[in-house]
């Protein structure tokens, strides 16, 4: 056994054939099971679809019967007098209670209804406004066109007849109406006490005496069909094998099942509850249809939107119906039956069931089972034989390639593979032979390429150095030797950490260019770019570092920042003079007081001077931030006091625009750890933006305690809002909301400065906004207690960072 196992493991043909054989056996078993299951499911799904169509046909035929009843009632009600036959107008005869005239006028219509399979009336009653019959004809059970005639029949006790005589509209829901015609089920009891169930449709009849007058109700017309004959008609139309109709209590009232009594077909309370659960109205669907809500495990067969009510003979309204799908054995035959609500003009009048025999599904599944198994077995055997043949064709050329490779490894470079197959194995053999022939050539080519790469590395203007996995420098190009001044690096081993590189803190986030990993080496400024050298097996071999000399760019950035700071300081002095003289002229009195036009022009000058002063102040602030000269002195600060300082210069602007300022501070609000002037500046920038972009309403300022360590200050305005695409870059420099006029728009630096100032104090700022409704800026600050002060000093928040 061990020798057999070793043989199976030592040759690749067995490694292919044995798992392939096992896989084929598994495929045969699983495939046959899946195929049988799919076939059975397919037949069952087709059977379910057929049964659903039967149920739809049943309800649609039921609705069509009601439509035809309404048409037949209309035909009777609008029949005019025929002098040739001495028949009166139906409406006039009803008003005059002319029973003989009605008898003559309805003979032809009675025959017409009998010959129409969609009407086929079994009873026709014309009654006066009191509910007493003027004509009551019943179709004889033994057949014939001459009806049984009854007199003194009263239908006044029928609720639907009472509603017709009162002129009520058929209600559907809270607001829907279907007209003044009604349909339903009722029973007539003969003189022997036997009840006959009918499906009936009743309509009122009005007489228009004069134009413009109120029509006079002269009675109504009722047409009905016996329920057992109607059920047989519906079964033939729907192509069901069996069908039944039940009342609202689940009692069977009519059925086509032979060999069982009606009491044997009554619905259980559990089945009634299940049907009710599957047809409970839910929420509005995507297309306005009512969606069914029911238990997830209910055996529901969704038979679609069934016509359940009628407005006119041409207009139908759909109601959702889901049936309970069950299997039952009746009279020694298995049926699949669906149960669903019976809807008559939008009102549930009971239940109905239709079923099909399952003999078709069982016989189809049995006949296909052995065929599927046979085909699956034949395919599996064929696949095993084909797999063995393919494995042999693969392993024979592989054996030759193994022998050739062993010879080449032993030094026989003249050995070549003899495989000549026109497939991938032949291509592999050809490639192997070419590899052997070019092995020496490739070795020489590698040496030549190495020399060329060394020349390329030497000619690169940026410094390039290579360190091994321990950080020791193993290679420098000429530019790196010049930058690092290490012309003798090959004579001594130098660790990268021994290089005199001094990290430069980054401050230039506004006007200057930010360089990551910036270092100073003597008078030079350089940046480093690192890349790991990784072998194919994932092992780290070292690091390649590229040195970029950015001395010229850094000096240019410094000069740019210094220039902005100098210009800003120089502009602030004349702007202060302009504002002072403008304010002095505006305060003139008497003869020195400016005219109205002059005052408006001076006010515009003053406002523009204020704007320019703010821009200059922002530029100076940015210059201080860029140069690292701005110091942050974190001390406990009263939020209410700082807010008052920030609001003071802006109150006049809010008042001039009739904007409200609501200040809502939480009781016992603790002090915050902040620099008073920088915090006032940050608050002022946000309030200034609110003043610029708010035209009505106002600003609400709320200060709340967020947690034991932080508080939040919310600035909510009712301004124009900020587009969603602007929010991610709102706190970047020179970002302004598009679409606002130049008088509103600022310099685009205020929020960038605000973010810098708040973050220097250990806080952060966020914003949410809805275009057209306003924005809310939230500043989060640390509470001032001893632990926060100690942490701030440890992290360096109290100095320029």
Image (tube, grey):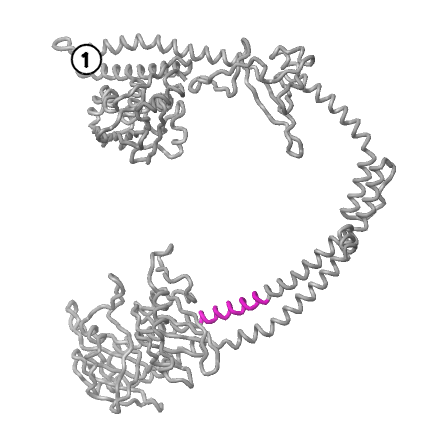
- Residue farthest front in this picture: 2
Q: Is residue 622 toward the left or the right of residue 716 in the image?
A: right
Q: Nearer the viewer, residue 74 or 305?
A: 305
Above or below, 562 against 296 in this view is above
- Give SS at disc 1: helix
Q: What residue is rendered at 25% in x and 11% in y?
A: 579
Question: What x and y, as percent, mark residue 402?
Answer: 81, 44
Q: Is residue 8 above or below residue 629?
A: below
Secondary structure mostly seen in the magenta stretch: helix
Image spot of residue 357 (x, y percent):
48, 77
Of all residues shown, which one is farthest toward the left? 590
Viewport quadrant of the N terminus: bottom right
Residue 368 occupies which quadrant of the picture? bottom right
Where does label 1 land, which residue? Answer: 586
- Judge from the rendering whether residue 431 lies leftward or rightward of residue 131; answer left or right: right
The part of the image, by quadrant, that contains residue 261 is bottom left
Nearer to the camera, 443 or 640? 640
Residue, x 36% and y 33% (percent of image)? 723
In the rendered image, residue 587 lying in the magenta stretch gets the answer: no
528 left or right of 581?
Answer: right
Q: Where residue 571 appears, x then y in whole percent?
A: 34, 10
Q: Position of residue 406 (x, y in %)?
A: 83, 41
Q: Is residue 47 magenta?
A: yes
Give residue 4's quadrant in the image. Answer: bottom right
The C terminus: image quadrant: top left
Q: Which residues are magenta?
A: 36-53
Q: Is residue 395 above or below residue 294?
A: above
């Amino acid at each position: 056994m061990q020798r057999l196992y070793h043989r199976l493991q030592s040759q690749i043909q067995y490694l292919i054939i044995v798992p392939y054989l096992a896989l084929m056996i598994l495929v045969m078993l699983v495939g046959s099971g899946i195929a049988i299951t799919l076939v059975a499911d397919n037949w069952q799904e087709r059977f379910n679809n057929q049964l659903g169509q039967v149920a739809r046909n049943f309800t649609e035929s039921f609705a069509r019967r009601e439509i035809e009843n309404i048409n037949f009632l209309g035909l009777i009600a609008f029949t005019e007098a025929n002098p040739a036959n001495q028949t009166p107008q139906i409406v006039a005869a009803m008003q005059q209670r002319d029973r003989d005239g009605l008898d003559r006028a309805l003979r032809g219509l009675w025959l017409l209804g009998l010959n129409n399979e969609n009407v086929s009336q079994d009873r026709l009653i014309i009654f006066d406004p009191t509910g007493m019959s003027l004509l009551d004809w019943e179709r004889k059970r033994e057949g014939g066109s001459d009806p049984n005639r009854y007199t003194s029949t009263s239908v006044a006790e029928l609720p639907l007849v009472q509603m017709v005589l009162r002129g009520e509209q058929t209600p559907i829901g809270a607001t829907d109406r279907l007209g003044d015609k009604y349909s339903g089920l009722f029973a007539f009891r003969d003189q022997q006490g036997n009840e006959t169930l009918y499906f009936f449709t009743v309509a009122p009849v009005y007489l228009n005496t004069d134009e413009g007058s109120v029509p006079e109700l002269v009675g109504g017309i009722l047409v009905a069909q016996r329920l057992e004959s109607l059920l047989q008609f519906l079964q033939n139309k729907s192509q069901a094998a069996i069908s039944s109709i039940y009342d609202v209590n689940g009692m069977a009232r009519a059925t086509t099942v032979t060999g069982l009594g009606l009491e044997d077909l009554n619905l259980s309370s559990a089945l009634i509850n299940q049907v009710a659960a599957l047809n409970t109205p839910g929420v509005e669907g995507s297309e306005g249809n009512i969606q069914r809500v029911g238990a997830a495990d209910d055996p529901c067969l969704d038979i679609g939107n069934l016509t359940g009510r009628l407005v006119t003979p041409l207009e139908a309204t759909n109601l959702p119906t889901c049936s309970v799908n069950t299997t039952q054995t009746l009279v020694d035959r298995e049926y699949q039956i669906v149960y669903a609500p019976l809807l008559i003009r939008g009102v549930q009048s009971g239940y109905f069931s239709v079923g099909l025999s399952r003999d078709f599904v069982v016989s189809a599944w049995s006949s296909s089972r052995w065929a599927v198994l046979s085909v699956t077995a034949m395919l599996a055997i064929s696949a095993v034989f084909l797999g063995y043949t393919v494995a042999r064709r693969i392993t024979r050329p592989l054996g030759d390639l193994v022998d050739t490779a062993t010879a080449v490894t032993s030094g026989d470079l003249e050995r070549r593979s003899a495989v000549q197959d026109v497939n991938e194995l032949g291509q592999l053999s050809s490639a192997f032979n070419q590899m052997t022939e070019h092995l020496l050539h490739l070795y020489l080519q590698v040496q030549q390429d190495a020399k060329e790469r060394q020349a390329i590395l030497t000619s690169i203007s940026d410094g390039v150095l290579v360190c091994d996995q321990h950080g020791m420098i193993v290679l420098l190009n000429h530019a790196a030797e010049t930058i690092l001044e290490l012309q003798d690096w090959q004579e001594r081993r130098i660790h990268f950490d021994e290089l005199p590189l001094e990290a430069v803190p980054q401050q230039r986030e506004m006007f200057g260019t930010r360089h990551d990993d910036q270092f100073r080496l003597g008078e030079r400024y350089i940046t480093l770019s690192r890349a790991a050298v990784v072998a194919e097996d994932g092992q780290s071999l070292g690091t390649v570092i590229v040195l970029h000399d950015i001395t010229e760019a850094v000096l240019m950035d410094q000069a740019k920042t210094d220039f902005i700071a100098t210009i800003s300081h120089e502009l602030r002095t004349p702007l202060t003079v302009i504002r002072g003289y403008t304010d002095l002229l505006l305060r003139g009195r008497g003869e020195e007081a400016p005219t109205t036009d002059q005052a408006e022009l001076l006010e515009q000058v003053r406002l523009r001077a204020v704007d320019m002063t703010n821009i200059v102040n922002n530029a100076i602030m940015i210059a201080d931030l860029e140069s690292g000269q701005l110091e942050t002195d974190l001390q406990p600060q009263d939020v209410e006091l700082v807010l008052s300082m920030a609001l003071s210069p802006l109150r006049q602007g809010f008042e001039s625009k009739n904007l409200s300022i609501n200040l809502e501070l939480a009781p016992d609000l603790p002090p915050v750890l902040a620099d008073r002037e920088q915090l006032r500046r940050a608050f002022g920038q946000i309030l200034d933006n609110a003043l610029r972009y708010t035209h009505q309403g106002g600003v609400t300022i709320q200060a709340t305690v967020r947690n034991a360590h932080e508080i939040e200050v919310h600035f909510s305005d009712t301004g124009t809002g900020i587009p969603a695409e602007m929010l991610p870059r709102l706190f970047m420099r020179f970002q302004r909301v598009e679409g606002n006029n130049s008088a509103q728009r600022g310099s685009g630096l205020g929020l960038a400065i605000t973010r810098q100032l708040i973050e220097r104090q250990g806080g952060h700022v966020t914003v949410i906004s809805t275009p057209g409704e306003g924005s809310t800026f939230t500043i989060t600050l640390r509470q001032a207690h001893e632990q926060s002060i100690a942490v701030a000093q440890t992290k360096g928040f109290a100095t320029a960072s």
